Amino acid sequence: MRSLIAFWIAHRAELASLLGQHVLLVAGSTLAAVAIGVPLGVFSARRPRLASPLMAVAGIVQTIPSLAMFGFLLPVPLVGGVGARAALVVLILYGLLPIVRTTIAGLRGIEPSIREAGVAMGMTPRELLRQVELPLALPSIVAGVRVAAVVGVGSTTIAAAIGAGGLGEYIYRGLSMVDTTVILAGAVPAAGLALVVDATLLWLEKQMSARRRSRSKRVAVTLAAIVAAIVTVSSVAAARRGSGAIVIGSKNFTEQLVLGELLAQAIERDAGLSVDRRLNLGGTLICERALISGDIDAYVEYTGTALTAVFHQPVTSDSSAVFDSVRALYAKSGRTLLAPLGFNNTFAILVRGRDARSAGLRTIDDAARESSHWRAGFGYEFVERPDGYRGLASAYGLRFPDPPRVMDLTLSYRALAAGQVDLIAGDATAGLIKGLDLVQLDDNRRYFPPYDAAVVARSGTLLRYPLVRSALERLSGRVSASDMRAMNYAADVEHRDIPLIVREFLAHVP
Amino acid sequence: MPAAAIEFRGVFFTRPGRARVLDDFSLTVDAGDVLALVGRSGAGKSTLLKLVNRLLLPDAGAVLVLGRDTREWEPIALRRSIGYVLQDVGLFPHMSVADNVAIVPRLERWSADRIGPRVHELLDLVGLPAAEYGSRWPDELSGGQRQRVGVARALAVDPPVLLMDEPFGALDPLTRAELHAEFRRIQSRLRKTVIIVTHDMGEAFALADRVGVLEEGKLIANERAATVAASTDPRVRRLLDAVPAIPREPGATAHP
């Protein structure tokens, strides 16, 4: 608890801007969902034949997990990609169902005699709608808006996976660092925000059902003032970040956060440009799309990953051949791969130090002998990648009694240390290897391709900003495997602040 | 010579999928007359009113309001020149009493300084002083008071024609008698052309100059009230006999 408050105090400016982004995303998507959903509800309330299929489709959309939805939208032009715009699209889609449904319910709940009286008095359909039907359906509509907004607060935390910002950034960052304090630093304000939104809209709903026009006018004015104030404050808070000349991305694990920060600080220091940090993007594919679409200008990729996961080429084990072919492939699509940073983050097949010592395990071949009574746990990516589990199993003849347990990459270190699994595939540079007393087994059959870390950037950006190019090139060959492991250790095990870790490291780079 | 304010000329009307509601139906209501149409539930009374304000159009024949075929009327303009009072009143629950009465004047874009005095005048007319009742909400009124507001609302832009659909059916007998008296007082001042539909012959006699009896889509009587009361037609008599006779208190006149 004390460390949580200390974290907030230390990160108050960042917390304010993440909270601001979160509120803006929720407010923006909810308002847009109202602007689309209420007319849609009005339109379909009178056409039962349209209403039921519409509700069915909206219901199906609602059941798609939001992370999957963000994934679907990645390759879609205009609305897709990464960042706040794509997140807004998903959040609006989620908000539509409750609003359309309650609009229809509210309109259908009006007593027929009231509508009949309006028509008989000579109201046009438009006058009837604006003066009678909408005011009477308003409490029901507000109830739908409440559901949409509260669900939106939750979905917005997931939007951090595609770089939309918001409090989810702390949650993802905490998950990748296996740091409960950082998770709570995002989760607690998000929950608080949901409660506040819920209570405010519930109050509004009650004011509306009181059917007091004069009072509800005052309520509307008050509410409009509150919303305007919130949006203004949030915009100011959110604007602390963003609007930089260069956008740096990263994937969603500790090393990538460190490297992303490293690129950003190097550019800020040596090129004197402001940098936007779009760190913690949901994975290789998301970074790749973001780089193509121009949502980010550069991030650190690993040569083996680029070859197999991005370009779908067969695996080879010669590191300079891999680098050359990846650089050529990037060059064809307008990207530039700079010289490697200096370390090879290959997959590390890890076991507990205790087991390694007692059974004398040194190589993956040694582990294959034990595999018949072991359980394995792998990250999602390792299970799917062509250079991942299936190839490894056939190269070494691994035979686990059960299929490997698929889990979050960072959690798998903890699972191994806690004895829930006996073998995992981690990163060779992970700080947790040292922190949790794990041992990396030797890839004695040279199964894994090289994973040399290197900056990949949009060629256009490098041409426009030569200083950015020289700032990034200055990092080449400067980050050794032990440097990387030490920085990861400082972040993951010592829970030190990443910008600080990077600043200390950068002080030694001329 | 009084002109016909409302006229049905050989009107046929069939609700989709149901029996014929009006079958070669003709009727004339003179300006300033009050006609009560009596019939059983389902005899087509409400349909008849809806044909007048063009909520429905006849299958054949014509309905004329103020000398014009309803087909030629612009429906919104037609409805705004016809006051409409219905049994459920249909007051708008989100508007105050005064705002409910002011609806049609507002739709007609009257100026605020014309609406205020008019609402005042109407609420006074129906016995609900504006100072006391104007700012109340419909759910704060009794059933009788709501119905008075309904009448005031129908009269707001001084329409020449008033349609009343079972207007006092849901009220207790005492309140109903009060409102009958009130209606006669108002009508004696305003001389509107009124059609009231009701299933209650007693109410018809209490309110109307003429009484029409509707059965199976046809008008089987359309006479001055006294003439209908004396009718020997068995179908009319059945409706007349349904009116409860008030038994005289025994010995009431025998007291010294």
Image (cartoon, coloured by chain):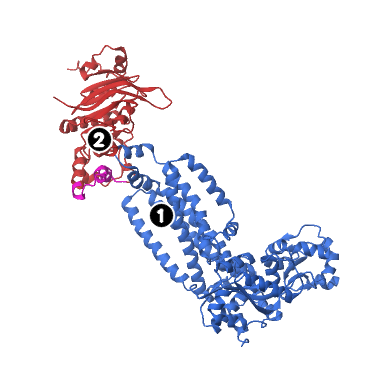
Q: The magenta stretch spans which residues?
A: B95-114
Does A151 sit above or below residue B89? below
> Label 2 is found on which chain of the structure?
B
> Closer to the camera, B177 or A232?
A232
State whether residue A117 is above or below residue A68: above
In the picture, the disc for residue A301 is: none
* Residue type at numbered disc 1: Leu
Residue B234: x %, y % from top left: 31, 12
Which secondary structure type mostly characterizes the magenta part of the structure?
helix
Chain with red colouring = B
Q: Is residue B83 above or below residue A87?
A: above
Q: Is residue A430 visible?
A: no
Task: Kindly report the distance in space between the C-alpha atoms of the residues bearing marks 2 and 1.
Answer: 38 Å
What element does badge 1 sit on?
helix
Quadrant of the rendered image containing residue A108:
top left
Chain letter for the blue colouring in the rendering: A
Q: Which chain carries label 1?
A: A
Give the residue type at disc 2. Ile
Instruction: Determine which residue is flagged by label 2.
Output: B82
Looking at the picture, tell me which residue is in the foreground, B147 or A36. Answer: A36
Magenta includes A369?
no
From the viewer's side, name the closer residue of A264 and A504: A264
